[in-house]
Amino acid sequence: MRRNLQLLATALPLAAAWPMVMEEVAKGRTLQKRVVYPTVPPPKFTTQRDNCGVHGPCTTFDADDQFVDVSQGSGHEFVSPGPSDIRGQCPGLNAAANHAFMPRNGLATIQQTVDGLEAAYNMSPDLSAILAVISIAISGDPIAGKWSIGGGFNGVLGLLGRPTGIIGTHNRYEGDASIVRGDAYLHDGDVDFFEMHRWEHLYSMLGDEDNFTHDKAAAQAYYTMRYSVLNNPYYFSEPFSGLVAPDAHNFVVSFMSNHSAEIPGGKLDGETLKQFFSVTGTPGNFVWTPGQERIPLNWYRRPSGQQMNTVDTNVDTLINNGMYPGIVQFGGNTGKVDTFTGIDTGDLTQGVFNGATLLEGNNLACFFLQATQAGLVDAATPLLEPVGEILSFLNQNIAPQVSALNCPQLNSLNNTLFKQYPGASYFPSGQ
Ligand code: HEM
Ligand SMILES: *[C@@H]1O[C@H](CO)[C@@H](O)[C@H](O)[C@H]1NC(C)=O
Ligand SMILES: *[C@@H]1O[C@H](CO)[C@@H](O)[C@H](O)[C@H]1NC(C)=O
Ligand SMILES: *[C@@H]1O[C@H](CO)[C@@H](O)[C@H](O)[C@H]1NC(C)=O
């Protein structure tokens, strides 16, 4: 991690006034760089969603079911990661590992992922299993059935390469326009760089109610997307990772809110947000400390009867995109800032999903699942040979959800369409 840049970023008076254009001593490759902070327009509409999202409203509260005991002696008390424990760019996973809901060393099986994320957050097993399966297929060890929530690890004998962990998945899992992390290209390949202006923007939306909501997450997603378009000549939104980044915005609200008898739909205040994101301080003086993500004491997850699943997260993202069109878009800048050019999803999918049908019914969830399957042949790094084995692992594990959703048949993605985007072939060193 590049702490010197982190310090530089924190020192900048970012909270002072945006929108604005300011000079910044830029990161390594160029001497000076103009940074443009976007403005967020009014939404096309607002929603009545509570913090459970489309799977809400959550109208019941059961303390026994929802209390997540992280007190001393619970077995789930906070412990800082040790030197050999792996942590990465996902605050939800880091917090789960810091509280032993996931193995503290940061390496997990599918079953450990499913059990741990259900216990900690009430993530539905179908969603956690798929996310773990994808992690294994593109960055883990399909033979041992393990994956890393951060950097690389040694796989079992028989695997030809060294699994990269989810840190090493730029444009495949990790993407640009994340809720607080900066784009890899703007940070010399670092996918874990905490960009303070994103956090300041997010935090400023809490307002007098001191609460973060789905509608506010939608505004943040628009802000982060526009920031990438305006500042990153290599901005690229790949068909699968381009959905993960917007989905992760709504994960914050759906999984980190505190539920109670008074507010069964959940409330996400600044203190809770800071603990989950490993941030201390106040606006203008925030400090991010890597790897110390916590589940707060006295915190209650969403109800077990209303877990969030694969379809829900994509429907929330669709609603967000309706509020602020452009949150879901595939394509990128063509080598200069503010040159966004979209890929026609009809061309990309040989007509299976066009721009209109993609946004209907379960189609976005289908696309989310199928794009990984179809994209893997090209995306799989040669390191993780044999590709055939990985593909069949992925197909076995994803196909049942695809058929349960009655998804249309998608056989392949026309990857030649990505050629015009320099960001599509940008691989941070070591990936
Ligand atoms: C097996 C389960 C999970 C996997 C494999 C996973 C993986 C990832 C990956 C690859 C990213 C990077 C995406 C990007 O570039 O924006 C990410 C980001 C993120 N994830 Fe997770 N995640 C999982 C579960 C969760 C849970 C349960 C939560 C919430 C409690 C969560 C919250 C987030 C957030 C907020 C980000 C954005 C981070 C940032 O920009 O700072 N994730 N996750
Ligand atoms: C959160 O804030 C919104 C306004 O931004 C308000 O409508 C809602 O009632 C608040 N919810 C909670 C739980 O405080
Ligand atoms: C969650 O809400 C309950 C009830 O209002 C409160 O006692 C508890 O302190 C809250 N937890 C957090 C982490 O804010
Ligand atoms: C893929 O896209 C390219 C560029 O638009 C086009 O020339 C080619 O015919 C497409 N291939 C298929 C199989 O559709």
Image (cartoon, rainbow, N blue to C red):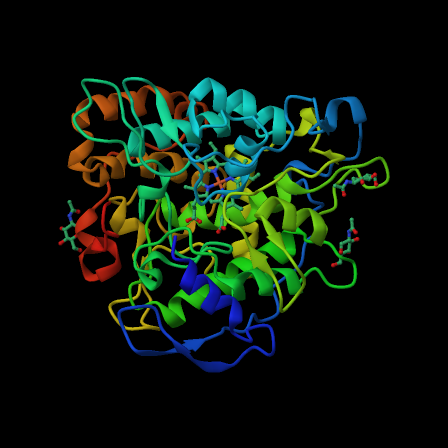
Between residue 39 and residue 415, name the one nearer to us. 39
Between residue 116 and residue 27, name the one nearer to us. 27
Residue depicted at x 73% and y 40%:
258
Between residue 97 and residue 370, name the one nearer to us. 97
Q: Quadrant of the C terminus?
A: top left
Residue depicted at x 32% and y 43%:
169
Whole-percent x and y of residue 155?
27, 24
Residue 373 lies, with reference to residue 64, above or below; the image says below
Between residue 17 and residue 26, name the one nearer to us. 26
Residue depicted at x 52% and y 26%:
102
Residue 358 lies, with reference to residue 395, above or below; the image says below
Whole-percent x and y of residue 86?
42, 35
Q: Residue furthest right?
A: 262
Q: Which quadrant of the render holds ligand 3?
A: top right
Q: Residue furthest front?
A: 83
Q: Quadrant of residue 426?
A: bottom left
